[in-house]
Amino acid sequence: MIQEHIKKELLEIVGKENFQDSKTSLLTYSYDATPGFQSLPDAVVSPRNSEEVAKIVKLCNEHNIPIVPRGSGTNLCAGTTPLHGGIVLLMKHFNRILEIDEENLTVRTQPGVITQTLIETIEQRGLFYPPDPSSMKISQIGGNINENSGGLRGLKYGVTRDYVMGLEIVLPNGEIIRTGGKLAKDVAGYDLTRLFVGSEGTLGIVTEATLKLVPKPETKKTMLVLYQDLDAAARSVSAIIANRIIPATLEFLDQPTLKAVEDFAQIGLPTNVKAVLLIEQDGIESVVNKDMELIATICRENDAVEVTLAKSSEEADALTTARRSALSALSRLRPTTILEDATVPRSEIAKMVSAIQEISERHQVTICTFGHAGDGNLHPTCLTDIRDKDEMKRVENAFEEIFHKAIELGGTITGEHGVGAMKLPYLHLKVGEAGIDVMRNIKQAFDPNNIMNPGKVFEELERKRVVVQK
């Protein structure tokens, strides 16, 4: 509960229309896209500019009030759930693209801009912003930065971190700093820009970002490859990369996911095969044509049963849109859908897919697998019911085994979703206790009162999934 004198100060900063504390309005911001972590905030505050953010943060720091910065709430690691109450800082007013600099190939944007809106606006200038999380139609740039979001094009173009050149940040003490900028080179001190990318709102609040752009590719082609054997699909992925071809997109869907997607999208996807690869290549037309011919040959040599090239841009877009809808399609099948991500070296994809199948069968839970096969980032997705306590225990045990297997194969517990509260119990598997201590010391240096998104990433909690409810 926010004390009356603090509420009065917040109202003076943002105005009555930008302050919410009714039970009904708070409920909306008590959860994100992660099941099992719902918790009510004490208030929702919507600042209109960086100066207001700074005043709010300074006030909260003085009174030890937790702050959770939030955009669209699409993240999948419980990163925007207010587990300790406090204030949800809603960035809905930070929704402007401030500058497109074609000479320096940069865009300066506020964090509340929708990802797809930014991408489409940039492409109208013949330029390209590659990071494309599947939630791009509703996710916001600030959330992408906080989680270091990836996407389908990550194999060829990298992830959000690779395009963030500079940030404006409000620190936990209310000070405003700027990092980086439009410079192609800048080694003046520590790389604070990269430190904040992927920090999940635990170190400060991003209020502006300068992002790198690249020329828009000349052409793009899309291919759908069908398999009756999962190992064959995985071998094809490794073989494509081994032949020094880096596709723009190299996606994998198993049969259960494929069936769900086709039922949802209704575009004529084949559902009688064990797996499909969705492959895109972009660039100079002659190079794209050559690459796609070689990719088709490689896939056939690795026992693909059918290789089909999209006949039009509309058909290609339909295939890509269908892949992006995988989570939505699967979520229709059971009351609860838990989408995880575990990443392994590309050469270990076949082993990882087989391990996920074996683990799901042994624990008697339903897990469908899809993901960015080209960069080894798989999304085992469990269809379950959070009300069934016995089944949820099996789900937890299955995912814990999946994370251990990913580490065993030289991988990690998360490739793009982040740690948040969901992966918190497993972070030590990847970075070790010493690594967690280093991160905790960095957090302490920036945020000694632990007001910034507390309960996320590396809190000292029991090594199991922690559900906090108010």
Image (cartoon, rainbow, N blue to C red):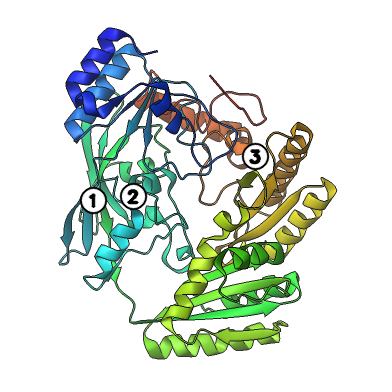
Residue under pointer 2:
141
Q: Secondary structure at mark 1?
A: strand
In the picture, the disc for residue 429 is: 3
Q: CA distance from mark 2 to mark 3?
A: 29 Å
Is residue 29 shown to the viewer in this render? no
Residue at 47% from the left image edge and 58% from the top image edge: 134
Q: Position of residue 127 (x, y in %)?
A: 26, 70
Residue under pointer 1:
109
Q: Is residue 406 above or below residue 448?
A: below
Q: Are marks 2 and 3 in contact (CB under 8 Å)?
A: no
Q: Earlier in the sequence, mark 1 or mark 2?
A: 1
Residue 449 in which image quadrant: top left
Is residue 466 shown to the viewer in this render? yes
Q: What amino acid does circle 2 point to?
A: Ile
> Which of 260 and 280 lies nearest the eye of the viewer?
260
Q: What amino acid does circle 1 point to?
A: Thr
Residue at 77% from the left image edge and 57% from the top image edge: 357
Q: What amino acid does circle 3 point to?
A: Leu
Residue at 82% from the left image edge and 52% from the top image edge: 361
Q: Earlier in the sequence, mark 2 or mark 3?
A: 2
Residue 169 in which image quadrant: top left
Q: Secondary structure at mark 3?
A: helix
